[in-house]
Image (cartoon, rainbow, N blue to C red):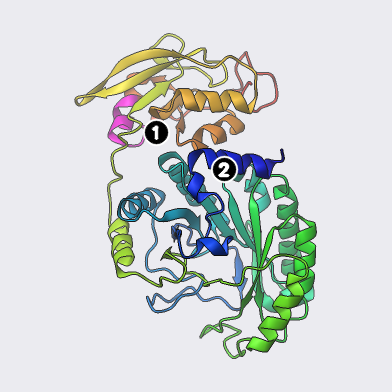
Amino acid sequence: MNDLAVIRKNLERTAPSRVGGHPCFDPKARARWARVHLPVAPACNVSCNFCDRRFDCTNESRPGVTSVLLSPWQALAYLDGLVARRQDVAVVGIAGPGDPLANPEATLETLRLVRTHHPDLLLCLATNGLTLAEHAAELKLLRLSHLTITINTLDPATGARIYAWVRDGERVLRGEEGAGFLLERQLAALDALRDAGILIKVNSILVPGINDEQIPDVAAEVKRRGAHLFNCVPLIPAMGTPFASLPPPNPTMVSRVRAAAGAHLPLMEHCSRCRADACGLLNEGTVEASLSALRTAAALTIPPATTARPNIAVATREGLLINGHLGEAATFAVFAPEGSGFRLLENRPAPFPGGRLDRWRDLAAGLADCKAVLVAGVGPIPRRTLESSGLRVVEAEGLIEDALEPLFRGAPLPASMARRFEGCGNACAGTGQGCG
């Protein structure tokens, strides 16, 4: 059984009615299952000549438009209310208003929260692909099942006409250099995701006179690299953009290009060109109740209480200090809130060393009632694995009680408790991946 089959089996065990229930990927689902986009990603790392994200009009439906921006916990509060009101929500996506992976902290934290609190919902992401490859492993751990990547051309010269600039960290690349760099990263991302078990849709924006003859070649290449579905999206000329004066492609051109692309991949032909805060069925339009709920969530200033995971675990050798490396801990002291303070609930055994990722998944399951784990040190792979399950990993040093008091209140740790790195512990195998 391949990875895609495994992920579908996993989803089938948790939500049998929602397998294949993504309304963008499955046309049969569009009249039955709703999707919601969580607008948590404002920044973008590519400037496209057809995009303008400055306007907020509820009558305007196109990518990059949103009424509000949400923090990850505000997005969770909004989603909690939405699924309480609607029984048809099947998919949670992040599609901007910038690029989700140009905002990796907010995007990945939001996906972790959704996966933890709503494990039966499908997760999806829409990205330009510039930094996708470096996050592919974590997206797989989060069981993200559907992903859209926008690739408009295979020709850097054409890309130089479509993109004003591409930002690589602190570097800003323009012209063919920027377009070529973006294309290289996009194709590498497809290669990285080939065996990740994620259904991949590739969007191409059809810009008349610029890339209309090249889109079928894009479809052929992305099929070779593992894409499952193709979407040819007609340009919407946006006022104030470099492409504002271009005419939208006429129906004849759209049909011709789609037919040629469809010779290589199945087509999505029911695209609604959704806003970054879209909610509901694809044909539902903007619902005032959803906009009101969005604005209410954006106005929240205090995160809702984490009642499902009230406890905090600590890696400690003697029960007094935070002095255990995650990979070395044989037990974890688990503390529960009590009145205005806390109490030791139990000393909980850790999984046996070995097993690589399975060890950290077992640990996450064993601490499923904890909202955080305090450690003296942790490697990058166990940290990502635990946090993808919704368990916050906090590195600190000092007295346990000095850390628990602010953490149970939802306050930051004192600066004096920040861990000063001295090296791995004695049990480290030397891989730098968490002693296990």
Viewer-side residue, 46 vs 282: 282
Q: Considering the numbered disc 1 on the image, is that residue within a helix, a strand or a loop?
A: helix
Magenta stretch, main secondary structure, is helix
Q: Position of residue 318 (x, y in %)?
A: 42, 8
Question: Which residue lies under the disc numbered 2?
Answer: 143
Q: Position of residue 338 (x, y in %)?
A: 23, 22
> With respect to residue 230, does 6 lie above or below?
above
Count neighbours of disc 1 (C-alpha within 10 A) and say few if under 14, some if 14 to 19, many if 20 or more: few
Q: Residue at x 64, y 39 (%)?
A: 6
Looking at the rendered structure, the kind of residue marked 1 is Ala
Question: For residue 5, what is the image quadrant?
Answer: top right
Question: Which residue lies under the disc numbered 1?
Answer: 415
Q: Considering the numbered disc 2 on the image, is that residue within a helix, a strand or a loop?
A: loop
Of callouts 2 and 1, which one flags the residue occurring earlier in the amino acid sequence?
2
Count neighbours of disc 2 (C-alpha within 10 A) and say few if under 14, some if 14 to 19, many if 20 or more: many
Q: Which is more foreground, mark 2 or mark 1? A: 2
> With respect to residue 132, does 182 lie above or below?
below
Q: Mark 1 and mark 2 in contact (Cβ < 8 Å)? A: no
Q: From which residue to which does the magenta span run? A: 404-413
Looking at the rendered structure, the kind of residue marked 2 is Arg
Q: Which mark is residue 6?
A: none
Q: Position of residue 327 (x, y in %)?
A: 57, 20
Viewer-side residue, 110 vs 419: 110
Question: For residue 361, what is the image quadrant?
Answer: top right
